[in-house]
Amino acid sequence: MVRQKVLLWRESAAGMSTLAYYLSQNIIDQLWVFTAPALSLGVYYYLTLPRVPFSELYVVGVFVCWWASGMAYMVSAVLPPQNVLMAGVFVSLIFGAFLHGLSPSIASARGTLLEGVLGLSYNRWAMEIVTINELKYYQVWAVTAVGGCEKGLGGSSSVTAWCLHRGSLQQQHTPGRSGPRYTRAY
């Protein structure tokens, strides 16, 4: 970060726009934001055989990586260089591992400041999207599972209605699909 600041000052003194420097750094960083989820999800998808298409998991992975990249930029801009690494790990651990919406639950956080903090957690939204996308492929069990999750986690009834609607569409279009998919072409 210190080297980048020195480079920015040098380029600014030579007449280069700071906006152009910022945009060029972000464009280069976006290559990693789009590559990292493909690499990690490739292994995950191969080992776990989820029913969700790879593209749906990839989109969630891109958004998680994008959030983490933005958080890293914010932490490195606000804190001194010697504290950036520890603070980045601390912030990503708090938002990813502890504030994910399961414990403390979203239902117990309603109407408190914690509800707003849970809304900032990338892992809460990523888990919710992946769970709903996975459950829509388990037609019969999806309604029961989402209903049970809502009672414990405090979700909205619109999620249940959407899953019911999605499940009925899936049953109409894929009547023979049942049970987990364990086949893989080698």
Image: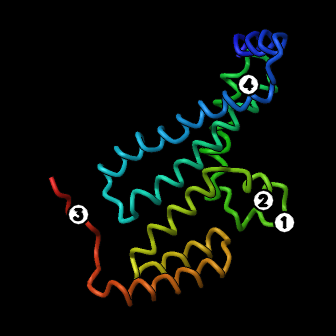
Give the residue number, with chain letter if any, for mark 4: 21
Q: Residue at x 79, y 17 (%)?
A: 80
Give the alpha-carbon distance from disc 2 to disc 4, as whole Å: 37 Å
Q: Which mark is residue 111?
A: 1
Tell me: 13 left or right of 20. right
Residue 110, quarter of the rendered image: bottom right
Kind of residue indicated by mark 3:
Tyr
User: As rendered, which of 146 and 178 lies closer to the eye?
Assistant: 178
Give the residue number, with chain letter if any, for mark 2: 115
Give the alpha-carbon distance from disc 3 to disc 2, as whole Å: 38 Å
Kind of residue indicated by mark 4:
Tyr
> How many labels sit on residues?
4
Q: Which label's residue is closer to the chain start, 3 or 2? A: 2
Give the residue number, with chain letter if any, for mark 3: 182
Residue 106, quarter of the rendered image: bottom right
Crowd rating for badge 2 (residues with CA inside 10 Å; few <14, some 14–19, many 20+): some
Q: Which label's residue is closer to the chain start, 3 or 4? A: 4
- Nearer the camera: disc 1 or disc 4: 4
The quadrant the N terminus occupies is: top right
Tell me: 102 left or right of 183. right
**Disc 1 and disc 2 in contact, CB within 8 angstroms:** yes
Crowd rating for badge 3 (residues with CA inside 10 Å; few <14, some 14–19, many 20+): few
* Label 2 element class: helix
